[in-house]
Image (cartoon, rainbow, N blue to C red):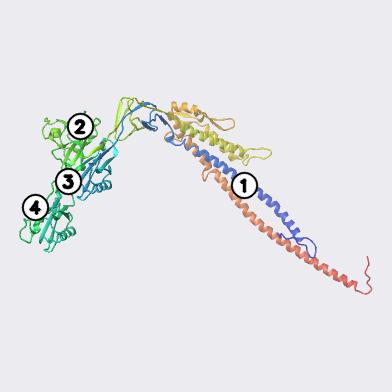
Amino acid sequence: MTGISFTGIGSGLEVSTIVDAMVSAESVPYESRMATLQGAYTTDISAVGALKSALEDVTASFGALGDEDEYQQRTISGRDDFVSLSSDKEAEVGNYSVEVLALATQHKLLSSAIDGDEAVGEGTLSFASGDNTFDIVVSDTDTLSDIRDAINDSSSNSSVSATIITDSSGQHLVLNSKKTGLDNAITVNATEQSNKLTSVAGFTSTDTVGSGTLSFASGSNNFDIAVGATDTLSDIVTAINDSEDNTSVVARIVTDGTGQHLVFNSIEPGTANAVTVTAADSDGSNGDLNGISQFASVNMDVPSVSNSDMTGLSRLSSDTTNKLTSVNGFDSNDTVGSGTLSFSSDGNSFDVNISATDKLDDIVDAINNNGDNTSIKASIVIDDAGDEHLMFSSRQSGDVHAITVTALDDDGDDNDMSGISQFSSVNQTATANIGHMSEVDAAADASIIIDGTIAVTNSENTFKDVIDGVTITANKVHDVGDDISRITITEDNDNVAAGINTFVESFNALVALSDQLGSSSESGGGALSGDSLLRGVMTKIRSQFNQAFDSGNDTTLTLSQLGIRTERDGTLSFEQDTLDDLIEESPDRVQTFFLGAEGDNGFVNNMDEFLGFYTDSDGIIQQRMDGKTAQLDKLDTEYEAFQLKMESLEARLLSQYNAMDLIVAQLSSTGSYLLAQLENMPGVVKSSS
C-alpha cells in the first residue's frame, strides 16, 4: 500500500484512500485468522513445554531414590576428643565402647653433633623402615647437608625423611619415619669405605714421580695408565680420570702438612670393588718406594675401618634391635626340613609350624603373618656369594627384647646344624647392636580396646572394620579417670525420607500445573483445557502410583504402605513414621520396592521409563511440539505469499484508478474547450443564469 494520500487530478477522488480501503478489505480478515492460528499454536507449544518440564522434574526427583548407596545408611555417634568415627551401611546397629591405650607414632632418630663443614666419613649408609630398604653412598667430602639431601633425593627412599637441626654444639641429622608403627622403625647401618688408597710420600705440585705403567683393577674393570718422566701428580690424576677404559676408579690429590698425596677411590663400595694397583716401573724396581712403584697398592696407605665406633660414618648408625642370622646359606628353592620353631622375645611367645616343602620365604611369611607374633620380624638377607640367610629381628631395641628360638625338629635332633634346628638361637649368629643415634621418639603402634575385652593394635591410628563397617581414628589416649568413649550406631532413614519428600514436592508441582493448564470456565479455560494429552498423562501416572511392586521374598508393596497417599485434590502426602516403621521392620523390602529385585524394575525405574515415553527427545510431547512448530513455519510461508498478493492487488488498483482519473481529466478538458467555442459563435447568447 502507498502510505501517501493524494487527490485525483481529473476526478478529484482520494485514490490512495480508496485503494487502501479495498486492500484492507481483502487483508484484514486473513491477518486476523492468521494471528488467531499463530497464537493458538504458540500457546500450545508453551503449555506442553511447561508440562514436559514438570514431568522432567518428577523424573529428576527420583535421583536419591534410585541410588543404592542412599539406602540402609547408618548414623554413628560418640565422637569426642579421644576418637573420630565414621561408618558405612555395613555397620551393625548397636552400642560399643572404645578405650585408646596408645597412639601410633613415627620413629625419630637424632645424631650426635657434627660440625657443618666437616666431612662425615666415607662409605655406605643402609636404611630400613618397614618394607623399604635403600642405600646412600657417602664420599669422603660429603657433609651432613650432603647426606641429608642424598637421603631425601633417593628414588629408592619411600620411608625416611631427613632434616638438620643446629644447636650450640653443632649440626644434628634427624631421621623421621614417614609412617607410624613399630614395623616402620628406622635402622641405619654404616659400612665404612675401605676402598681407598693414599700415597705415603708428600710431593709438591711441580714434582715429577718417574715413569712407567700403572695397572688398575676394581671389580671387573681393568685398565692401564702410562706415566711419562715429566708427569706431575696432576698429570697422573688427569690421565686416570680421563681414561676411556676406566669405569671404576676416581683419582684426586689431597694436601696435608707433608705435601700433596695421590688418592685412589673405587666408584662402587664393597670388598669386591677394592682397588688394586701394580706398577711396571721404568727404574726396574716395581716394589720399592721410588718412582711410580710407590703408587702400587702394597706401598699405599689403607685407612683402618670400624663400622661400630664413634668416628667417621659409623656415627650415623642406629641399629639397636636384636638380630639372629642363620649360619648356613640356602638357594631360594631349598627346603629346610620340618617341625616347629618356638619364638620368645620380652614375654611374647609363639610357635610356627614348618612343613617339609617350606622354603625360606615360606618361613618368613609364616612368622610375620602369625597372629600371636608381636615381637619379631623375619627377613631374608643375601651374602656376597648370593646365598640366602634367614634373619630374625626384634621389633624393639634393648636387651630385654633379645630373641630366643628353640626347635622341635622332625629329624629327631633339636640341636644340630641340619633341619630346622639350625635356626635355633644357639646355632645362629647374633649381630652386635650398634646405636650411635639417640631415639627422640620411639616407633609405636596404636592400641585400642573394644568393649573392654577385645585388644587391637595397628601401625596407624586409623582402625578400619574392627567393628564391621566402622572406621575408628584414635586421637588421644584415655588416661586414668577419663570416661571411655561410647559408640552408638543407629538406622539412618533420612536419605530415603528426603528422597520421597523431593518426589512428593515435584509431583504436587505437576498437579498444580495440570490444574492450571486444564482448567475450564465461562470466562476462558487453561491452555490445555480438554486436551487428551494432559488428561492421559495424569491418569496414567496415578495408575502407576496404585500399582504394587515386588519387595522381595514373594511380597509386594504400594506407595500407600510406605506412607505416600493421594489426597482428594490429587496431590500426594507423606507420613514418615509409616516409612520408619517399615524400614525398621524390613529395610530390604523398602529398597527392593524402589530399586527392584534382580532382573526386575522397581518403582523408580518403572516411573523413569514411563515418563520417558512422554519426555524423551523423540517422545510424545516433543513430537507434538515439533508438529506445532512446523505449522507455525507453514503459516509464515503462507503469510509471505499473501503479502505478495496484496502488494500486487494494490499496484493493480492504483494503476486502474490512475488511468480512470486521466480519462476523466481529458474529458473535462474537452468539455471546457467545446463550451468556449460555442460561446464565441455568432448569435449565441450566454445565459446569465
User: Residue tagged by mark 2?
Assistant: 401
Distance Cα–Cα, label 4 vs label 3: 20 Å
- Mark 2, secondary structure of its residue: helix
Amino acid type for the residue under numbered disc 2: His
Relative to 512, say whether 120 is above or below.
below
**Residue positioned most to the left:** 284
* C-alpha separation, residue under disc 3 versus residue under disc 1: 95 Å
Q: Nearer the viewer, mark 3 or mark 1?
A: 3
- Using the image, tell me which numbered label, if any, was put on residue 192: 3
> Mark 4 — residue?
298
Find the distance from the CA under tag 2 to the CA under tag 1.
92 Å
Disc number lying in front (2 or 1): 2
Mark 1 = which residue? 41
Residue most extreme to the bottom: 682
Name the quadrant of the N terminus. bottom right
Residue 415 placement, left or right of 64: left
Q: Nearer the viewer, residue 311 or 527?
A: 311
- Residue at point 58% right, 49% down? 629
For the residues carrying marks 1 and 4, which lies nearer the camera in this image?
4
Q: Which dot, 2 or 4, sits closer to the camera?
A: 4
Q: Is 617 positioned to the left or the right of 323 in the image?
A: right
Distance between the alpha carbons at the discs numbered 1 and 4: 110 Å
Q: Earlier in the sequence, mark 3 or mark 2?
A: 3
Q: Which residue lies most toward the front here?
A: 168
